[in-house]
Every structure is written in structure tokens, then in C-alpha cells.
Image (cartoon, helix red, strand yellow):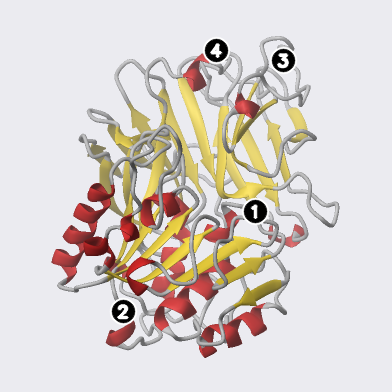
Amino acid sequence: MFIQSRGLRSLPVLAALLSGIALVGCNSDSSSSDDDTDPGTSLPELSEEVIRPLVFVHGGAGSAAQYMSQAMRFTANGYPEEYIHAFEYPGVAPHNPAELDAFIDNVLAETGEDQVYLVAHSMGTFVGYEGPLSEAIPNYTGYLMVPEYATKVAKYVGLDGRTAETCPGDVPCLGIFDADDGRALGDNNAYLEDQEHVETATSAESFALQFAFLTGEEPAYTRIVEQESPVSISGRAVIFPDNTGTDGATLEIWPVDPDTGMRSAEIPMETYSIGADGHWGPAELSPDQHYEMTLIRDGHSDMHFYLQALPRNTRFVRLNASATGSQILANTNTGPEHSTLVVTRQREWIADAPDGERDELWISTTSPQWGDQAPVNAIVEGVTNGNIGLHIHDDESTPAHSSLALLDWFPDQAFQSGIDVYMPATDEPDGTITLRSVPHGNEGAEQIINVPNWPSDSDRISVQFNDWW
């Protein structure tokens, strides 16, 4: 990986960090200090003078989940967990900067501070820095363009979106971009070569730049350091992409056998009633245990979520469901004899890397009734590098066969694709679907999640891989 910087001479800590990171391999999660040390309760100490509430504004069709890994890195470096917040707007486009201002006012009131650090990604930079977004909302004004709002921002970071060397109101600004991105507006920018659009928001390299710019100090850790068990997990169950709560739903959390994905208890360990805001938790979970989170909604199939273990406290877990009558549901082939998957991570699936390598996502199924299915790699030609969510199911045109062809409709949606993979199922799961993710260029960092072969006419499966390894 190569990082290029311009206009950063006034920031000696950041400039030194840029020089150091230029030697780090792309997609690394390395540390600038002794990564073998688990800080436990002895976190690095930060001066109170550099700690301010941090507000993240996500990109289009995104959520707080895009900043979950970065929030964990901040807390591993001594940043107060309660000082990290995410502003989530409904839909794929922002509405009114006054909504962000009301959110920031609440954060300031809760913390007793008078300014925030504002970090925005992609479309979120139009919310945070400068509009208008498009002809569809020509009167939209970015937050920093309103003088009375800009005074509430101590520093601003724009991630692969809009930024300039000096923001309105003389707010110090930093832009972090994919090196191939031509949208940089000012000289105070850093470029991360061979990183994709969402990756610039979630990578360890991006975190290091953000932390140094905001605090003036080099982070002690850039990897996510596991805290002592248990961890406190909470989040929202929402309708994708509107970020509206699944009002009236019930969420159950079950412990599962990591080798099969099957439930290892007779009753759920936690049950939550979901209100209009979608919030659930907190749940005290072990980083060494695997869990299933089941969202139950009247008139909908049960939605089973399987996440990798989360090593630190987080409030940014997001469980995405589909609205009644959505095109996602309409274009998903379901039936009693096969499963459907939605596989996501907040870091693009790479099908075409500069070195010629690609990510691998191997999917296999065991089923005593229908027979086992050998592993197939779902990262096929045609799955572009910009995809976050992969819809995987048996195509109606080639039943009971993994053609690995792209499914209709899904590849035309932003950040999504679809692949035909046959995963046999029964009324009561009789086997296991194994998903093995192998990051390109880092074959030793494979990630494995096992889930039951739920039938897709009554149950849907969502698998969320971590965006770090």
C-alpha cells in the first residue's frame, strides 16, 4: 500500500504517521506498538483536552455499522465509548441539516461539551460538509455551510467524499480518499492506494489517520484488541435501506454450536421487544461464544442473523430486514427445499485486485435428506469490487444446481450482487451451511461461520463477516 499526502506539513504527528503507514501492507490490521499486549482495563491514556464527542455520518444505504470497527479501535486507544455516536438518516439520501444539528445538540447536552468531531463517509460528506447532493434535493445545504452549525465542530474528516483544506468557519479538515478517486477538492488530503470506497471508512489505515488528526497523537493500537469478557452488545433492527425501526418485532438471542450453527439451549438467553426506534440490548455476550439473533415479525419469515464474535463493546450492530413488498423479497427465489443467504461485510468483496488475486467465499452444505453439496466459490467473475451485500440462493431457472451465474436484478443495485448457489434445506434444519471467507492476499486469515440449513419459504438467513481479520 502507498499513501500520498499533500498540505499536511502543519500536522507533524499526522505527517510522521503517514510516513510510517506507507511501509504497511495494504489491508493490514497492524499496530504501531506491541500488538501482543492485551490492554484489558489498562487502556492507553488520552488527554482530556483532545477528547470530544465524535459523530459519524454514514454513506448512502449505510448505517452506524460502517463505523463499528473504528469505534472499537478508538476505545482500544483510550477513547470513551460513550463519546462515540452515529447519526443515521433514513433512506439513501439525506434530508435536512437541522436534523443533524438536533442530533449534535443532544450529544453535546449528554456529554457537557461544546464541540464535536464530525466524521462523514461518502454521501454523508454532503450531509456534513457541502450540498446540494443532487437535482432531486437542490436546496440541501451541508452542515458546515451553516455558520451557526459550524461553530459546534472542532474538526472534520471526510472519507472518500467531499472535503477541502479549510472548511467553512475555519474548521480544520482532513480528507481521506482512495488513491484512484478524483473527487478531492483541496490539498489537505491523504490517499490510500488499493482501498475501495467503503474500505476507506473501515480500514486500520484510515483509522490511524483519523485518530492522529483528531487527537494529535499516534494510536497505540490499530488492530482491534479484545477486551475482557463479557462484552456489551446493542444496536438496532431496521428496515433496509430506510434505517427505520422494525416496530413490533421481537428479537431473540440464542447461543449456538460454532461447528453446526445449531442452537445449544432450549430457550433464548435474551428476548427484546423492538419499538419504533429499532433499538435492542444491551446483551452481555462472550467473545468466545457464537450466537444467533432471530428477528420475528408478523407476516414475515423469521430472519436469522449470524455474526462473527465481537471482541469489544459496541452499540453499532445493525440487523437489516426488508420491508413488506420490497424488491429484495420479490427477487429472491424461495421454497421449502433450499436456503437463501444474504452475506455482508463492511468492506468490499474483491473480485479483481491489482495483484490479480481475489477474495474467496466458499459455500458448502450438508444435508442427510438431500445429500451434501461440495464447496463452491461465490466470488465469481462479474461480482464487481464495489459490493458489500451478496444475495445467494438457488436460481429458479436452474433448480438444485449451483450454476454460479449472477442472479437477475441484484447486480444492478448499489453495493449489492447476487449469485446462484444451491443449498438444500428441510422443514427442520437437518444440516449445516458452511461459509468460509478467505481475504485476497491473506489466506491465513480465513473466517468461518456455520449456520443451519433453514428452509427459505419460512426462514431467511443473514451472515455478517467482520471487516477486519
Residue under label 1, please give it.
Answer: 196
Q: Which numbered disc flags the more N-terminal residue, 2 or 1?
A: 2
Type of amino acid under label 1? Glu
Q: Nearer the viewer, mark 2 or mark 3?
A: 2
Q: Which numbered disc flags the more N-terminal residue, 4 or 3?
A: 4
**Circle 4: element type:** loop
Residue under label 4, please give it.
Answer: 336
Residue 18 position, x and y percent, is 62, 80
Instruction: In the rendered view, tell whether residue 325 sits above or below residue 433.
Output: above
Q: What separation in Å lies between label 3 and label 1 (alpha carbons)? A: 34 Å
Q: Nearer the viewer, mark 2 or mark 4?
A: 2
Q: What separation in Å lies between label 4 and label 3 (alpha carbons)? A: 12 Å
Q: Which numbered disc flags the more N-terminal residue, 4 or 1?
A: 1
Q: Nearer the viewer, residue 41 or 381?
A: 381
**Circle 3: element type:** loop
Residue under label 3, please give it.
Answer: 400
The residue positioned 65% from the left and 56% from the top of the image is: 182
**Circle 1: element type:** loop
Looking at the image, residue 93 sits to the left or right of residue 33; the answer is: left
Residue under label 2, please give it.
Answer: 51
Q: Which numbered disc flags the more N-terminal residue, 3 or 1?
A: 1
